[in-house]
Amino acid sequence: MATAPASEPMQSLPSADDLQRLVDTAPALLHSAQPDGSLDFCNQGWLDFLGARMQDLQGWGWASWAHPDDLPPFAEKWRACLRTGECFEGESRVRRADGQFRWVWMRNVPLRDQSGRIIRWCGAGIDIEDRKRAEETIRRDEEALRRSEGYLAQGQSLTHTGSWAFNPRGVFDFWSDETYRIFGFDRTNAVTLDGYLACVHRDDRAETAAILQKMVAEGCDCDHKYRIVRPGGELRFVRCVGRAVRENGVVTQLVGTAMDITEQEQMTLELRRSEAYLAEAQRLSHTGSFGWNVTRNQIFWSDETFRIFEHDRTKIKPTLETVMERIHPDDRKFVQDMIDRILKDRRGWDLEHRLLMPNSAIKHLHVVGNPLVNESGEIEFVGSVMDVTDSKRALRKIQELKDRLYKENIALKEEIDQASMFEEIVGSSEPLRRVLAHVAKVAPTDSTVLITGETGTGKELVARAIHKRSTRCGQAFVRVNCGAIPQSLIGSELFGHEKGAFTGATQRRPGRFELADGGTLFLDEVGELPLETQVALLRVLQEREFERVGGCEPVTVDVRVLAATNRNLQDAVSDRTFREDLFYRLNVFPVHMPSLRERVDDIPLLVQYLAERYALKAGKRIKSIAKRTLDVLQGYHWPGNIRELQNVIERAVILCDGEVLSVDETWLSGEQPNLPTPSGPLVTSLRDQERQLIKSALSECRGRVSGASGAAAKLGIPRSTLESRIRSLQIDKHRFRSP
């Protein structure tokens, strides 16, 4: 047996207008019905057949049009199909608009959603009035009509289908011209059973052969839908209806019709596919859709809308009353007023309201709708409904969190003002007194202050002291560590962003400038800002306004800016890594924090203060500090400044078992002690050589210190040691970075 050729690739999908024309011009009578069986669509062929309009047929039940004699068996079979979901096939006399009845054969196929629920019935019918009349004639004179080729031609012409006759001996006695056309055969050649089966799709071939054998053996009728592959490789769908002819109780011939139903099948498949795509999209977005025909007061809900309203679509038909029953009592008047307005003005709407569910749960809905005028001039509204309950809950939790954080912030401010050591600047040395004198003079003004100094010298304490003694002390003090925020996010952190400005920006977020409005913004490590952010910062300092990331509206703020850095910004300006105009804008009032090496006289006071603080925290009593400890601490050069001193004292308090605090000298062995430094050309030369060696390594490694390709690995020393020497020699490692 020959192998059927492969099917041609599927063509591009037709447009909606093409599908409509295809449906209206199809030779079959196409229709669709609601899950309960009520008619909701007929193609133009049905309308022409009935002599009626579409609006006259909406909601038709079978009792509306079936002949009274045909109704009981027909209705019983249809109700059984509605219960079981099986395909319906049957014939009945149909009353037309002129009151006449004509025989129609119909087949209804259930269309299901992903869960298997029937959402619509799609069907096709054939005007078989002439065929029924012919059958009546056949019953009166079967022998004469069976031999009449004229009847076969007439029947084919009336039914627009091909006809055939099959001899149980395995030969097709007759194929009409239409049948040859459907199968793509050359009518000059006789059609054998093997040739016929060879054109049937391989997946349907066995079933088709079995049906023929059963008809011959049992004399039963058939109504079989299957696929064929034409000689050119084109795949088509065919529906054959056959009947066995008996003589003296023996099957002598099979006769029937063949109809090409490819267009109907493709339309059904496309409809199923489109509805499946829509249902899946709504499921993923948690958004239902609806349609409301105001003229007919008909409402259509998608599966997701049924789920949102928690109604079973097999048990309830949505109406305006169904919707209003679910709306929260406090929102019903508002929604009803809105409905009255849109019906009067014929305009769209966008609103939120609540639903009160049977279990007393409350849902929040966001509903959007727009008016349309259909081809019949009827007003329809289409729209979407989204369950935003989770979003509302999240916003409520966020607000609760904001309120709690605000209260905690107030409590924290009070705690800092009363007890925190980070608001205390301890010392009486001359360098520190000069700093405090400058702070006292600049604090009451609104001038921008640039605080410089090594890491750990207390630059943030000075910034807080300036804010606390300014006229803005009652407003927020907002700190930003510019070196700890990725460069791609620093703009959003400072100036905020609009919803959708970048991936992950699900809502508008205010930046630090907006949070500090009316107060003080402290930019720590300002030298780490990227150049594009420096431009935006300069605009804020000059014009007191900025734009959020992704926005176009200017935002005006009243913020005092304090900045701090451990870098040499003048060198950064020379290296073009820091804007010169921004440097001058920040450097209005410079304050330099001295290192702990420059405040040796303050070390006893700091040690005493820190010891008391940590002892109180640990529940211990420290009465004095060992003299040897003070000598060691004052002799150490403190590369980590006060922050390092805090760590050493905290460690000593933890290990202290008595009332005298002492420090183990080995704790300071990780850094070079502050021994008397001999002067002379040799020392100067060695320091210069070391500085030059480190600079060369940094230049070759493009400013990278750690890692396999870093300067530390190149010099063969630990990273921490290199970092310490860079700070000690006051080398700006950032200037060696690649642009």
Image (cartoon, grey):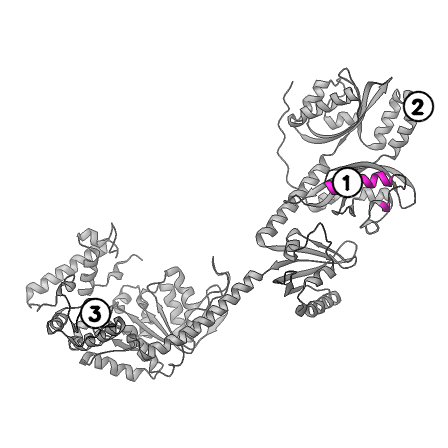
Q: Quadrant of residue 85?
A: top right
Q: Secondary structure at mark 2?
A: loop
* Residue 643 falls in image quadrant: bottom left
Position in image of residue 252 (x %, y %)? 82, 17
Choose between 179 and 609: the one closer to the eye: 609
Q: Furthest residue to the top?
A: 169
Q: CA distance from mark 1 to mark 3?
A: 89 Å
Instruction: Specify which label sits upstream in the sequence, 3 or 2.
Output: 2
Which part of the image, by quadrant, shows the C terminus? bottom left
Q: Is residue 540 left or right of residue 282?
A: left
- State which quadrant residue 318 falls in: bottom right
Q: Is residue 208 left or right of residue 618?
A: right
Quarter of the figure that contains the N terminus: top right
Foreground of the two, 2 or 547: 2
Label 1, secondary structure: give it. helix
Q: Residues within 10 Å of mark 3 (few under 14, many from 20)?
A: many
Amino acid type of the residue that numbered disc 1 sits on in the rendered structure? Ala
Residue hosting label 3: 653
> Which residue, given by chain and number where applicable, does mark 1 sit on?
80
Q: Residue 407, relative to residue 444: is it above or below? A: above
Q: Residues within 10 Å of mark 1 (few under 14, many from 20)?
A: few
Residue that protrudes farthest toward the right in the picture = 140
Q: CA distance from mark 1 to mark 2?
A: 36 Å
**Prevalent SS, magenta region:** helix
Is 700 placed above or below 170 here?
below
Boundaries of the magenta span: 63-84
Residue 141: image tag: 2
For the residues bearing labels 1 and 2, Cβ distance under 8 angstroms: no
Is residue 335 covered in magenta?
A: no
